[in-house]
Image: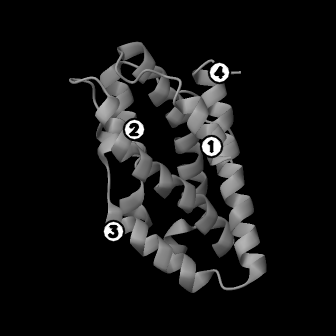
Amino acid sequence: MHDRVDAIFSHVDLGTTDGYGRFLAAQAAAHLAVEDALTEAGADRVVPDWNSRKRSALLLDDLDKMGVTPPPRPQHDAGTTTAAIIGGIYVLEGSRLGGSVLKNSVAPGLPARFLSASDPAAWRRLIEIIDARLTTADEIAEAVDAARAVFTTFEQSGRKFLRVN
């Protein structure tokens, strides 16, 4: 699923205003929906630094500076179990790592706070949480299912906003 999402998002030229604007819109539709759902599900009780991990405000600021109206957010059910929340956060944190590479493709002068919000230590802390809190095969399977649901949300958003079939 990661490869499919990567393939969709890699077709856009981040070096152009139009391409980068569409990229941010596609990111926003999915990211904002998932982050909101995780917050409502109680992500802060599972990942104590959840509030500092959220990047919605950065994404909305980049969209505003680009003159792009935030797109409607699809429904995303994050699930409320520890495993489901961890699975969702895993995908968002992975996208943060990918953003640190993608920011180098953004044309100079375009806002890139969302992609620049890199924190490798946050990834290591998340892996520690995963190791401590997902201890059974059922919990791991539930986290994987939640991660797949997040990837699906990003895939659908990418196809819609990046005009990829």
User: Is any atom of residue 79 visible in this view?
Assistant: no
- Assess whether mark 3 and mark 4 are in contact (beta carbons under 8 angstroms): no
Q: What residue type is labelled 4?
A: Val
Q: Report the residue marked by disc 4.
A: 164
Where is the C terminus found, in terms of image quarters? top right
Labels 2 and 4: the sequence-earlier one: 2
Q: Which callout, 1 or 4, points to the residue nearer the camera?
A: 1
Q: Report the residue marked by disc 3.
A: 121
- Assess whether mark 4 and mark 1 are in contact (beta carbons under 8 angstroms): no
Camera-side residue of 35 and 87: 87
User: Is any atom of residue 84 visible in this view?
Assistant: yes
Q: What residue type is labelled 1?
A: Asp
Q: Report the residue marked by disc 1.
A: 3
The picture places residue 44, in percent across and down from the top left corner, at: 49, 70
Left or right: residue 61 versus residue 128 is: left
Q: Is residue 74 above or below residue 136?
A: above
Q: Report the residue marked by disc 2.
A: 59
SS for dot 1: helix
Q: Which amino acid does label 3 sit on?
A: Ala
